Image (tube, rainbow, N blue to C red):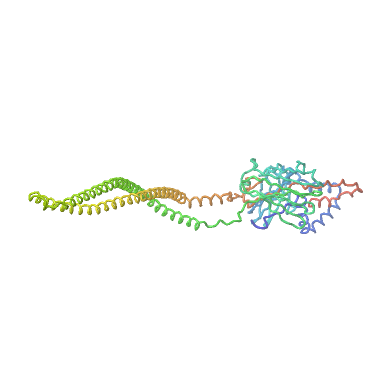
Amino acid sequence: MENNDVLLAPRPSSVRGNVALRWIRRNAALVALSAVLAAGLGAQASAGLAEAALAPEGSAAVEEAALGPAAAFEKSEVVYADLDAAGAPVAAYVVNRFDVEQAGSVVDYGDYSTARNLSTTDALSLDDGAVSFEAEEGTFFYQGNLDAVQLPWTVDVAYSLDGVETDAADLAGKSGRVGITLSTSKNPDVDPAFFDSFMLQATFTLDSSKCSHISAEGATVAQAGADQTVTFAALPGHDGSFGLAMDVVDFAMDGVQLAGVPYASPVEVPDTSGMTEGMQQLADGVNQVAGGSSALSGSGGDLASGAEALSGGVAQAAAGADDTASAGAAIAQGTSAMGDAIGQQAAGISQLRGVLDGIDVATLPPDAAQQVEALKAGMAAVDSGMAQLDGEYAAYDAGVQAYVDGVGELAGGLDGLRHAADELADGVRRYVAGVEKLDGGIQSLDGETSKLPATVQTEIDDMLSEFEFPEFASVSFTSAQNPAVRSVQFVMTTPAIAPAAPEPQEGPDEPEETVADRFLDLFR
């Protein structure tokens, strides 16, 4: 939108006054001549001129100009609406601007009660909602006062003083805590293109000498000379709900101004491809980890089985060692008893040999002596054998005792090993359970991260979609029959809150208005 498309919000009188001043400067000689002619005419002629000058455009008193070839132009509309203090529309008019590239006739449509030329003194023809005129190359303005007021937004404004709902008119000159709430919503009776594509901005202008401790959540507060401006905004297609509170003294406030313009996003959408590619790399890396985790989890089952088998084998060996140790103790007792018996027998044989050795064979008969000698020799051999047996058996018994002690120590060691194997198996079981849980988590992470790039892109798209609104189709607000509409804007204003003006005092009678005065009144 070009800078010269943005129009301030003049009241009808100020628009007429500014246009009149410009026209009078350009046509000073014509104004002077008109005054002279008016002064020289008779009463009847003067009255006829005045009636023609004051007749509303499009009435029977103004002859409709004959239309020539159509002009080539682009049109802009600025809709000015007066709202009451509660936000309901009271009156509205449209300033229509035509940037004419080729002079010619123009027919513009709108539900107007009156239409006024703001660029030249040429008459406009208003007939059944059609305004027609001839336009020269350049810029042409006319104002159409709407017969019915329907705006794209329904506006509601409420006021309170110290927490009590109060009419706006009753706030003037009051002191306390003033609250103002303003809400906007879609008007279903108006083309939705404006509500869906236009941003609505509400601006409060506050006198800093009267208003302080301003609270306005979500608003932009700025200093403008001696005033503070509080500005809220509703995005296209969204209802607005704004709240303003302030401490006031001798309260007064200019009217709230609402401006509706086509939305243009000030944010350039960043390139997110690099981020999504990084997310994809992360997802691929997690997928590789998930593969390794699955392999580790699978081998954990074999490890657990081996630990269980080791624990069972050690338990069996420990049980066998315990049984062997118990049997070895009995064997050791038996061998000890046998060794004692062999020792006793060896001692007895030694005593018997001593008895035989004490027999004097010389005193015996030859036969008896010979038998005794043979017995002594046999007993000596037995005694020697028993002595050898007793010694060797003692070594055997010591070996048996050492074996039994070794088996006992082995059984004790196997019991410790069995406990260690049990702890190992339990630890392996916990490890395998942890690996399986880890694998489950990694597999879940892999499943989520595999969707991450698409999810992130979707979230980005959803976030950006909140600020993507239908592009304004450049339709006319006043009539769908109007072509070549470049832009439409809305300016809505509530009345100011101020003490009532004093009653005017009666003064001397004003001089009777002349024809020239009445002629110039057209442009004041």
Residue 513 point in image, percent of width and height: 86, 49
Counting from the top left corner in percent of width and height, residue 166 is at: 77, 41
Q: Residue furthest right?
A: 508
The residue nearer to you, when weighing 513 against 438, is 438
Give the farthest residue toward the front: 363
Residue at 81 percent across and 51 percent down: it is: 521
Residue 125, horizontal then vertical, whole percent:
71, 47
Residue 22 in view, yes or no: yes
The foreground one among 459 and 482 is 459
Is any atom of residue 129 visible in this view? no
Q: Nearer the viewer, residue 516 or 109?
A: 109
Q: Residue furthest left?
A: 367
Instruction: Give the position of the N terminus as an image quadrant.
Output: bottom right
Q: 357 or 154, which lies in front?
A: 357
The image shows residue 470 at horizontal and vertical percentages of 58, 49
Q: Relative to 49, is 258 on the left or the right?
A: left
Q: Residue at x 45, y 56 (%)?
A: 281
Q: Is residue 422 left or right of residue 514?
A: left
Give the number of callouts: 0
